[in-house]
Amino acid sequence: MSYCGGVRRKTQTSWERALAQTLTKIGLRFTSQRQMVYSVLLDVRDHPTAETVFLRSKQAMPEISMATVYNSLDALVKCGLIAQVNLHRAATRFCPNMQEHGHFYCDDCGRVYDISLAPGAGMVDIPTGFEPRHFEVSISGRCLECGRGESRAHSSERSR
């Protein structure tokens, strides 16, 4: 049985079956709480913090606790279904996009965006004997929306 907008249903979607198989493969149980947390991450791909995932999950599953959300996020990271995104000194965010990509963090509004990487991006000279397993690319600056807002503010100042 699964949740859909707070309503229980008896059939599983393809991502729910994949979630169950992936959790089982590493020795974890498929639970409605883990399903809810994963669903929240897939529904709105805005790189939410654990607190945001908790608040969204609570809307459809009022009995879920913050500890359960943290444990579910940890399980989803361990089985490779989501990634932790650490930017600056901000709270850890979570990303269900497991394709090779980077992140753009807007210093003004705090949104995080997925950015495509050119083939070979992130490749650096690695010292002999080192075995890289993972790399992260993150860029910070101002997003297009915030840039537009500032340019509108400047144009209205000039017209005064």
Image (tube, rainbow, N blue to C red):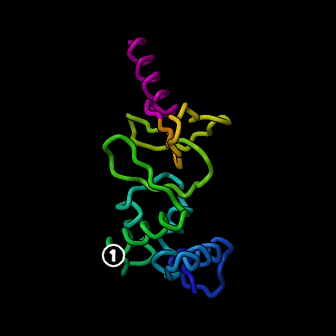
Tell whether 18 sits left or right of 139: right
**Foreground: 154 or 91?**
91
Picture residue at 60% right of the left edge, 85% below the top: 9
Q: Position of residue 79 (x, y in %)?
A: 53, 67
Q: Is residue 152 magenta?
A: yes
Q: Based on the displayed image, in which of its 4 quarters is residue 120 positioned?
A: top right
Picture residue at 38% right of the left edge, 71% below the top: 71
Magenta part, dominant SS: helix
Q: Reply above or below: 92 against 101.
A: below
Residue to which mark 1 is pinned: 65
Label 1 amino acid? Answer: Ser
Q: Position of residue 117 (x, y in %)?
A: 62, 37
**Secondary structure beneath disc 1?**
loop
Picture residue at 40% right of the left edge, 47% below the top: 86
Write the start and end of the magenta stretch as one range.
Answer: 139-160
Q: Position of residue 80 (x, y in %)?
A: 54, 63
